[in-house]
Image (spheres, rainbow, N blue to C red):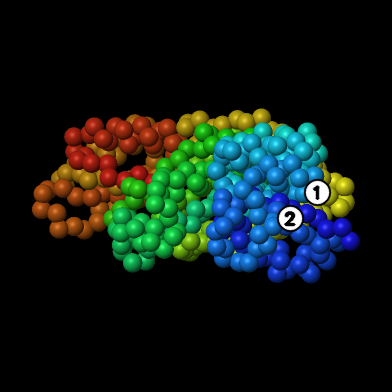
Amino acid sequence: MKPIRAGLLGLGTVGTGVVRIVEGHQEDLQRQVGSPIEIRKILVKDKTKAREIPVDPAKLTEDPWEIIHDPDIDILIEVMGGVEPTKEYLLAALESGKQVVTANKDLMALYGQEIMAKAREKGCDVFFEASVAGGIPIIRTLIESFSSDRITKITGIVNGTTNYILTKMSQEGAAYEAVLKEAQALGYAEADPTSDVDGLDAARKMAILATLGFRTPVALEDVDVRGIRSVTQEDIRFAKQLGYELKLLGIAERDENDLISVSVQPTMIRKSHPLASVSGVFNAVCVYGEAVGETMFYGPGAGQLPTATSVVADLVAAAKNMKLGVSGKWAVAPYREKKLKTDEQIASKFFLLLHVEDRAGVLAQIARVFADFGVSIESVMQPSSGDSSGCADLIIITHHAAKAAFGAVAGRLESLEVVRKVKSVYRVEG
């Protein structure tokens, strides 16, 4: 029985997990595919380096083109990361008729449309389940399981590093900087955590999910991004008092006119909502469909074997399509025109924390600003404090309001004499 042969670009954490699963689950894989699956060649930086698992030295190469140009290799698996030269390798592999499996969220967020176009041109598949939320099968679910429904909203915790940081801050009362250092020591955060804590990693994933869910070509620059660096213990404490948790949420919405918005931002979410209880490095994605209602997908967002499981599942799917002769027909290209909402069309509730003068008439002046811009106030709270400076904190939660109108309110309050400082602003969900 002729085996399906794969070439593997990268033998780091995920690549090692892929080899482990393919070699350890060979009987199961063969029964699913109808043929053995063999990893024929593996790209590494240094063939002499000691490996976590035993690998036949004859399979190792330091030349990617040895894999890409090998006519006996059917499927290219990319787990090396990076955008360049990885993009060049994948396009070349597709050009030569190879199926592609990748875990590369950066590449798919930035150049996914180009890569998928090349795949369609050559009648090949590109599978990328592991690029979002590690071991959670969310991409195949959006493409296949929701094909008969109209998705209106996707909300998710899709970055484990920031969720770990916010969880520790919430549960242990630790400061942001201290938890970040701990996350780096544990390997949850990189030495340069910018991509995670500034929301860029989550934004790339949300661009992919919105593209698939709304059948619209959403680019990274279409995502409104704000990270967690400014989140304070005070914000978390007040959120809890009001019945919320602070989470870095990705939110993609579509209205009845196919106008969409995509954002990543620290958000106050009701404790009764299932996303509020997602803790540590775990990820979760809620998908809202007109027919099915609300569904939630939860699991590990990273890690060697969870991510490798998604990669191997894609490998099996690509191999099955090859055997059936239907390669290149799996994913439907985005076919809806991209129509982005303006700030006047994006609406939500908002949380506002002000430091104000503590005297009569202040609240009336602030309420007048909200009225001037047509923003309705849902609740107001003045937390008790031992401040002897004649000032106090004031918490305001609005009813649903346009983002533009609320932005105008916040801007006006910044210049109001009785407002010493606009301390925090957050979107409110649930």
Q: Quadrant of the N terminus?
A: bottom right
Q: Mark 2 points at which residue?
A: 40
Q: Please report the residue visible at 42 percent of the width from the left and 42 percent of the height from the top.
A: 226
Question: x and y percent of residue 358 in the render?
Answer: 16, 47
Instruction: Compare residues 411 and 234 and report the one nearer the observer.
Output: 234
Q: Please report the residue visible at 44 percent of the width from the left and 49 percent of the height from the top.
A: 196
How many numbered badges does the structure rendering display? 2
Where residue 386 sits, quadrant-wise, is bottom left
48 left or right, relative to 119? left
Considering only vertical position in the picture, is 47 above or below 256?
below
Considering only vertical position in the picture, is 173 above or below 360?
below
Q: Please report the residue visible at 64 percent of the width from the left and 36 percent of the height from the top.
A: 88
Q: Which amino acid does label 2 sit on?
A: Arg
Question: x and y percent of residue 53 in the render?
Answer: 61, 66
Residue 72, numbered circle:
1
* Helix, strand or loop status at disc 1: loop
Residue 295 seen in the figure = no
Question: x and y percent of residue 59 in the render?
Answer: 69, 56
Where residue 256 sits, quadrant-wise, is top right
Q: Which amino acid does label 1 sit on?
A: Asp
398 left or right, relative to 20? left
Residue 25 seen in the figure = yes
Residue 296, numbered circle:
none
Instruction: Compare residues 139 and 20 and report the one nearer the observer.
Output: 20
C-alpha separation, residue under disc 2 versus residue under disc 1: 9 Å
Dot 1, crowdedness within 10 Å: few (<14), some or many (≥20)?
Answer: some
Indicate which disc, 2 or 1, sits on the residue closer to the N terminus.
Answer: 2
Q: Do the residues labelled 2 and 1 touch (CB within 8 Å)?
A: yes
Q: Please report the residue visible at 65 percent of the width from the left and 40 percent of the height from the top.
A: 89
237 left or right, relative to 261? left
Instruction: Compare residues 364 and 421 and report the one nearer the observer.
Output: 421
